[in-house]
Image (cartoon, rainbow, N blue to C red):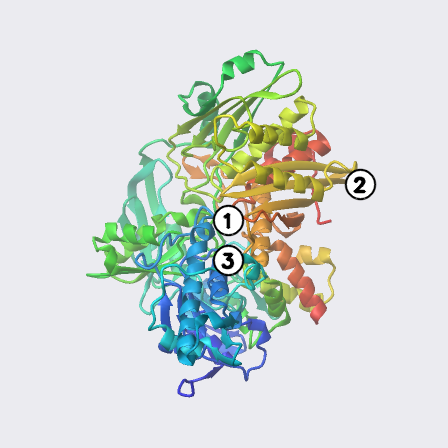
Amino acid sequence: MATLTKTNRRDFLKIAGTTAGGLFIGFNWMSCDSPKMEVLSTEEVLANAKNFNAFLSIAPSGDIVIYSPNPELGQNIKTSFPMVVAEELDADWSKVRVLQANLDTDKFERQLTGGSGAMPHSWERLRKAGATAKYLLVAAAAKKWEVSADELNTSEGIIYHKASGKKIGYGEVANDAALLTAPDEIPLKDKKDFKIIGTPVKNVENGAIFTGEPLFGLDFYREGMLHAMIQRAPFGMKIKSIDDAAAKNVDGVKDVITFENSVAVVGTSTWPLMKAKKLLNVEYEPDGKVESSADHDEIFKDLLVNGKAEVKREDGNVNAAFKNAAQVVSAEYQCPFLSHSPMEPMNFFAHVQADKVELVGPTQTPERARSTAAEISGIAPENITVEITRLGGGFGRRLSADYVAEAVHVSKMMNAPVKLTWSREDDLTGGAYRPAVRYRFEAALDADGNMTGYKLRGVGMNAGNSTREHNFPAGAVDNLLIENVNYESSITTNAWRAPITNFLAYAEQSFLDEVALAAKKDPVDFRLELMEKAKANPVGGELQYNVDRMIGVTKVAAEKSNWGKNPNVKQGFSVYFSHRTYVAQVADIEMENGTPTLKKIHVITDCGMVVNPTGANHQVRGGVVDGMGHAMYGNLTFEGGLPTQTNFDKYRLIRMKEVPAVDTYYVDSGFDPTGLGEPCLPPTGGAIANAIFSATERRLRSQPFIDQKEFQDLNLGIKRA
Amino acid sequence: MALINLKINGKAHSVDVEEDTPLLWVLRDHLGLVGTKYSCGIAQCGACTVHRNGEAMFSCITPAASLTEDEITTIEGLSENGDHPVQKAWAEVDVAQCGYCQAGQIMNASAFLEKNPKPSMEEIDEAMNRNICRCGTYHKIREAVAMAANSK
């Protein structure tokens, strides 16, 4: 390929920097210390590459471009998806570079990030994309050499004919291969032959991340664009009057505009807008429920007793079970609203023109961004493009398109390209939170300590269904009643990493420990007895979780944590199934100088096959840190329709010194891979709360732990062992 | 508006901005150096960390006009080829999840290791406690700082 311009590595980095949203350095970034190392830019590769399918292009140089359709927010999909394609292709990973695909609903299905569902959805599709291209490359080589394709083997981007000793690179047959047609059925590799899947592969964007290249939505820049920031109304209120005179006087402010209960300041850079926003004098008046946290506490207590509940699941005869019980255990658990608080605040670029709209930015749901823009602009979706930037975290917040809508409104009204930026204060006060929920649990025990009845009633603030009625212990209890009450609050909510289960798992697993204590049974034995019962004779017919996998992680957790064997270590157990993945956790507390000290959390995960061990460890430990941080410290309270905590000085996120050791183990159950972005979070709060009880006999029934009266003189130390 | 002269990554820059403009916004909006991140704006999270004469500094609360006599280094200028020992360690340990906070983490870690080249793990925890990572990459950050210290 002598005709192609070659660039050295330093130039390559510069080229990478000028291409917004897309480029990454597709070779082992740090292994290329020599500036003499020559690589083609991705533009150069693509100019000559043949496209094989939605996921894959191969250039005559042998360079491979893999398109990753789903938004990357730290779940490492931009590395793990291409790994799967490259595996079946038998590619040389060092020749692979990855591009973020723009929204393309013709080429891709389920182009979104949510529900830990990308890998289970795409696993077969990705494998087929790689296997199909490999089939065609081999067929092209066979044709060229006039031999049967059966006689050829592939390895790391090279096709071999053993009998003749011939070999040829994928790039050299790519043009011919692209002219061939593949059959519908393509054989996939035996999992035991995997060479890339199951090995630790580094994040493909490390180079750009660690040198500060523009990657994120907030980094996006377009010549001539305007900046915008928005003042939003408190929940349940509407604008009564606006005095924008002082704001308009700030140097760098071009205009102040109003739409749908929002006031936007528009200007030429960010800082003047931050100042101008503070100078806006907007008066609000009630337009619905103007709520405070004290109101919510009253509403919870009232609805738990008097609310009209929807029955989500009913097995057996609950009334009889509780009437005949030798012992009844009951407890209530409550959690507050939480902000998602990704480190990159909400932002989006929109350019509404007469016949088209261009959107660029961080979104978990690019298709929703497009339909939102279509609705506001009146322009057909096919004339709206969405470029997906890297997301500086999401946690569910960027499933909503409210901030996309704002950018579109402002661009349309200003008739200009606009980048909307939320401040951190906007992010904490602008809504779409994890809903606050209160649960009441009741358990009936017979004289032998068997749980014969179980009742759960959940009341949520805009939580939808605050229960997971078919999850364990459903199926393990003869008489069971799960009920839900939803309160329609003016405070907006949406999915927050592991929706509902991020709190329900803690409450349930903590309550099951309370029941085990009343039954005078070991917490792990107590759960295993229930699981064995569900396995032998599932109540209500087929179980909606795989009880063998749940038993599996539970037993491995007991073994790996040395459960109950060391009297100096006080332990708390928790196990939960969510997002198709099974996770058991054990928290270890040791007494140090009379202070209970949280030292370690053991995590046992069954997510089927682990695609990328280094990425998996990230999700497991990150989920635990997230679960612990919010259980311990997270709290968003309201006064007059506004959050009390408006920035990280008051809204407390977990920090370096507050993180114990996290040991990770994976159970190989032989299943195809399932998602890991969410399922390791739910069990953590329960494991820690149960360990705290074990060490101190203090039962923490509400979050955040640090605000509970039981916690006030506890002085819990946190230290890595 | 005021003309402010700055020395950033060894180069002289002159910007015409409001006098109270924090360095962060001069870097991001006026100089196109977007590796330095905005997240809280009140010196709580460390995403905006740069070096002022080699010391870690929150650029979100420091007016650019107060820095005219100083040498400023941002993530873009930490090394010529992205090969500062801390950057190398970050890649080797594969620290990032979303990656948004990592430039600030790297700038804090590199300034810290200049002052304390052989820190204890407790000192690492103490120094890195001023930067928030919402994804929870703290275990890997700690490992990478220790690796960078040992590589020197």
Q: Callout 2 environment at 10 Å: few (<14), some (14 to 19), or many (20+)?
A: few
**Which amino acid lies under the numbered mark 1 shown in the image of this protein?**
Thr
- Image position of A457 with respect to B29: above or below: above
- Image position of B138 with respect to A553: above or below: below
**Which quadrant is the N terminus of chain A positioned in?**
bottom left
Residue placed under numbered mark 1 in the picture: A674
Q: Nearer the viewer, residue A319 or A23?
A: A319
Task: Tell me which label, 3 or 2, sits earlier in the chain.
Answer: 3
**Which amino acid lies under the numbered mark 2 shown in the image of this protein?**
Asn
Residue B29 placed where, x, y %?
A: 41, 66
Visible residue check, residue A639 = yes
- Image position of A19 with respect to A320: above or below: below
Is label 3 or label 2 in front? 3
Residue placed under numbered mark 2 in the picture: A593
**Which amino acid lies under the numbered mark 3 shown in the image of this protein?**
Asn
Decide: marks 3, 2 in contact (CB < 8 A)? Answer: no
The answer for how far apart the CA atoms under marks 1 and 2 are is 43 Å
Residue B6 placed where, x, y %?
A: 50, 73
Query: In the rendered image, which quarter is residue A289 located in?
Result: top left
Q: Say which mark, if any, is on residue A546.
A: none
Residue B145 placed where, x, y %?
A: 66, 63
Residue placed under numbered mark 3 in the picture: A76
Query: In the rendered image, which quarter is residue B139 located in?
Result: bottom right
Task: Tell me which label, 1 or 2, sits earlier in the chain.
Answer: 2
Task: Tell me which label, 3 or 1, sits earlier in the chain.
Answer: 3
Q: Secondary structure at mark 2?
A: loop
Q: Are marks 1 and 2 on the same chain?
A: yes
Q: Callout 3 environment at 10 Å: few (<14), some (14 to 19), or many (20+)?
A: many
Q: Secondary structure at mark 3?
A: loop
Q: Chain of mark 3?
A: A
